[in-house]
Image (cartoon, grey):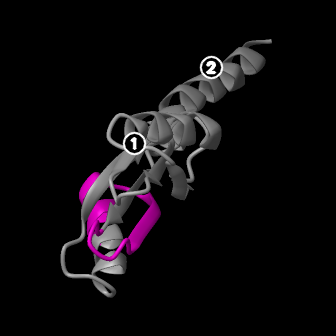
Amino acid sequence: MRRSYSVLAVLAIAFTTLAPAMAVADSYGAIAYSPTTRADGWSHSFSTRADAERRALRECSGRARDCRVAIWFKNACGALAVGQNGSWGSGWGSDRRRAELEAIGVCNQYTGGCRVARWVCSGAP
């Protein structure tokens, strides 16, 4: 009986010390945008915000010189909406639909006819 308790104690200690290491790491994504050319770049599944933004900017900068980060997000989704006159808005949410609705809502504050130009989720569960 004592042996059973010892085994259970060892298992309990192992589980409590290993559980934090098994936790899912944060996952970052970003969308970059050029209002002049309407080019965009995006990223997902990066371990830091800086890396996600850098990748999105690099993707966009291959097609435009005035790219800037429109939005970054962590363990979520992001979206970019562009309107008739080139005005834009971005948003994030726990899923694609929420991110798109937020981006369209922000874009509509500046212009009409806003449509989602890009969406991406960070890759985290």
Q: Which residues are magenta?
A: 34-54
Residue farthest to the left?
66
Which quadrant does the N terminus fall into?
top right
Q: Nearer the viewer, residue 17 or 96?
A: 96
Q: Amino acid at mark 2?
A: Ala
Q: Which residue is mark 1?
A: 107
Label 2: few (<14), some (14–19) or many (≥20) C-alpha neighbours in 10 Å = few
Q: Is residue 23 at all visible to an observer of this figure?
A: no
User: In the image, is 50 to the left or to the right of 8?
Assistant: left
Residue at left offset 46%, top offset 45%? 25
Q: Nearer the viewer, residue 60 or 29?
A: 60
Q: Earlier in the sequence, mark 1 or mark 2?
A: 2
Q: Position of residue 114 (x, y in %)?
A: 49, 48
Which quadrant does the C terminus fall into?
top right
User: In the image, is 35 to the left or to the right of 123?
Assistant: left
Report the disc number at residue 9.
2
Label 1: few (<14), some (14–19) or many (≥20) C-alpha neighbours in 10 Å = many
Residue farthest to the bottom?
62
